[in-house]
Amino acid sequence: MIVSEALRLGVQSLGHAREVRLLMAAALKIEAGRLILHEDVALDEAIGAMFWAYIQRRLDGAPISQIIGRRQFWGRDFKVTQDVLDPRPETEGIVAEALTGSFSNVLDLGTGSGAILISLLMERPSANGVGVDASEVALEVARCNSQAFDIEQRCSFKHSDWFHEVSGFFDLIVSNPPYIPAKELDALDAGVTSFEPHMALTDGGDGLSAYRAIFAGAATHLTPVGRIIVEFGAGQGPDVAAIALASGWKDSEFRKDLDGRDRILVAQNRH
Ligand SMILES: C[S@@+](CC[C@H](N)C(=O)[O-])C[C@H]1O[C@@H](n2cnc3c(N)ncnc32)[C@H](O)[C@@H]1O
């Protein structure tokens, strides 16, 4: 069987041509953009078996990024495993917002794959940063990504429950924390709840506990001119802004995602 024939059969069973092409490119260990050059080539038996195993995993609901082990974020290719949240396009809003101002020392709370922190450091070659996570295995993925982008001298990763093990001051604190209320987990797509780490999705409570810890802890870790930029879930904006205000942050503004929904809060200046 040649590659194009396997692609056709793959689309018949999976239904998504784009995903099938990504899976075939991963099995062939080539960039998806180069697949067209391989379409008339006979499919090696072992590679074919891998391709069909990938198709089956996708049919079982595994996210495409976990199957191919990669995810594009802010124009770069990140390693992704079952131990980290699959970085979402809307989270690029944190990076976009952070880059509207200056910073030299960033703290990323709940760094996961390191996608936010590493993207920021890649865009600002003189900046340094720390990525924190309560998951050791997630931190291994983040370290691996920092090495792949050759910035491990400019960032360190720390196992910590939010600020507990963090010392020093930062002029930018970013976070995309687990914000899904426990009672809403059942309503999520099974591909999310079965394949992504539970602790990356929810705090097990009302979905707001991370914001309480972040805005309170930032009081002793943010420089006077620094900014806090956090992502939140649909409808959580007023609660998150109220937590920021109650923790002493007097100026906060929302930013919208591409669907026009408030998605990010930028907080700064204490009373
Ligand atoms: C929604 S994921 C975000 C991952 C990554 N920053 C991104 O945007 O793709 C939340 C992350 O917070 C981490 N986390 C959960 N509870 C934590 C805690 N108490 N302290 C530090 N990190 C925590 C999770 O392990 C997970 O990596």
Image (tube, grey):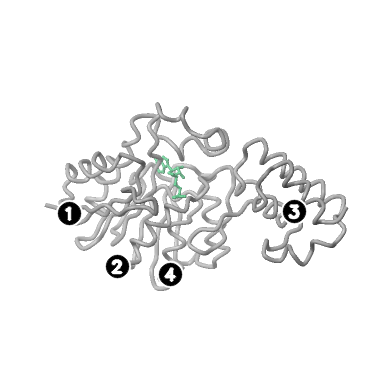
Q: Say which element carries label 2.
A: loop
Circle 3: residue type: Ala
Residue 123: assigned label: 4
For label 2, the crowd category at 10 Å Cα-Cα, with few meaning under 14, some 14 to 19 and many 20 or more, is: few
Residue indicated by mark 3: 27
Q: Which residue is mark 2?
A: 101
User: Label 1, on which residue?
Assistant: 251
Under tag 4, what secondary structure?
helix
Gap between marks 3 and 4, in whole Å?
31 Å
Residue 18 appears at what percent x and percent y? 65, 53
The residue at the far bottom in this view is 126
Nearest the eye: 99 or 140: 99
State how far apart marks 2 and 3 are (Cα): 41 Å
Vertical placement of 104 versus 257: above or below?
Answer: below
Q: Earlier in the sequence, mark 1 or mark 3?
A: 3
Residues under labels 1 and 4: Cα distance? 26 Å
Across and down, in percent, residue 33 comes to 67, 65
